[in-house]
Image (cartoon, rainbow, N blue to C red):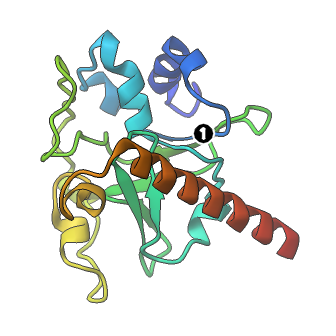
């Protein structure tokens, strides 16, 4: 990962490594993007959780998901929506997956480089003392306009679209969140097993 310019993210993971479950998939901004982010030491774990999926997902698993698939992040109440473009690019919310399968296959983690730092949801307060800033996006690197079949809000918002989980009424109870996340992890695991047996 150091050679692939994700050394800073690796250092953040090492800071809280014993608190991260195995078989996590990391969505990693590169060193240049993280150099402009301000991450207090007591919020590193939250930052890592916001940039991870609680299931092992290789690029082939992600790219084979149906367009618009909802994936849980390791941060409670935050979800990713997959968007695949006609040119083959894959987005998770507004972050383009730019470097697939960066981690060594001998590790219990899966890693993919992404095009931006994921920001805290605008309607949800970040934990006390958190300021997560990133450089303004390069206009050339912005994703193209969403396809007509996609809801216009899924890619137009400057922040990822966590409304899927939190804007549809009152907050869910913690047990509902755990059940929902468990369902997603079970679904992803089943999908991976079916895919591997078919291949």
Q: How many marks?
A: 1
- Relative to 88, residue 167 above or below: above
Q: Name the spot of residue 51 as percent of width and height, x first.
A: 42, 39
Q: Which residue: 31% across, 88% down?
A: 149
Apparent side of residue 122 relative to residue 54 in the rendered image (left or right): left
Residue 25 falls in image quadrant:
top right
Q: Which residue: 84% across, 76% down?
A: 198
Residue 136 seen: yes
Q: Which residue: 30% across, 83% down?
A: 147
Q: Name the spot of residue 139 as percent of width and height, x first.
A: 18, 56
- Relative to 85, residue 127 above or below: above
Residue 160 falls in image quadrant:
bottom left
Q: Nearer the viewer, residue 172 or 184?
A: 172
- Kindly state the secondary structure of the residue where label 1 is placed: loop
- Relative to 12, residue 88 above or below: below
Q: Name the spot of residue 13 as percent of width and height, x first.
A: 52, 22
Apparent side of residue 144 relative to residue 16 in the rendered image (left or right): left
* The C terminus lies in quadrant: bottom right
* The N terminus lies in quadrant: top right
Q: Nearer the viewer, residue 185 or 1?
A: 185
Residue for badge 1:
24
Residue 29 seen: no
The local crowd at label 1, few if under 14, some if 14 to 19, many if 20 or more residues have their Cα within 10 Å, is many
Apparent side of residue 8 relative to residue 39 in the rendered image (left or right): right
């Amino acid at each position: 990962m150091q050679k692939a310019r994700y050394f800073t993210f690796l250092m953040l993971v090492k800071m809280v490594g014993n608190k991260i479950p195995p078989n996590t998939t990391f969505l990693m901004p590169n060193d240049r993007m993280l150099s402009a982010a301000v991450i207090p030491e007591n919020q590193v774990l939250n930052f890592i959780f916001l940039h991870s999926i609680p299931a092992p997902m290789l690029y082939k698993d992600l790219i084979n998901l149906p367009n618009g698939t909802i994936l849980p992040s390791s941060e409670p109440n935050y979800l990713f929506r997959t968007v695949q473009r006609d040119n083959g690019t894959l987005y998770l919310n507004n972050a383009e997956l730019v470097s697939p399968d960066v981690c060594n296959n001998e590790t219990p983690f899966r890693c993919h480089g992404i095009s931006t730092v994921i920001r805290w949801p605008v309607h949800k307060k970040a934990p006390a003392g958190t300021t997560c800033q990133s450089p303004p996006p390069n206009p050339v690197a912005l994703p193209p306009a969403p396809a007509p079949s996609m809801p216009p809000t899924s890619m137009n918002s400057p922040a990822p679209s966590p409304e899927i989980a939190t804007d549809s009424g009152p907050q869910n109870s913690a047990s509902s969140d755990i059940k929902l996340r468990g369902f997603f992890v079970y679904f992803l695991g089943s999908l991976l097993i079916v895919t591997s047996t078919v291949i």
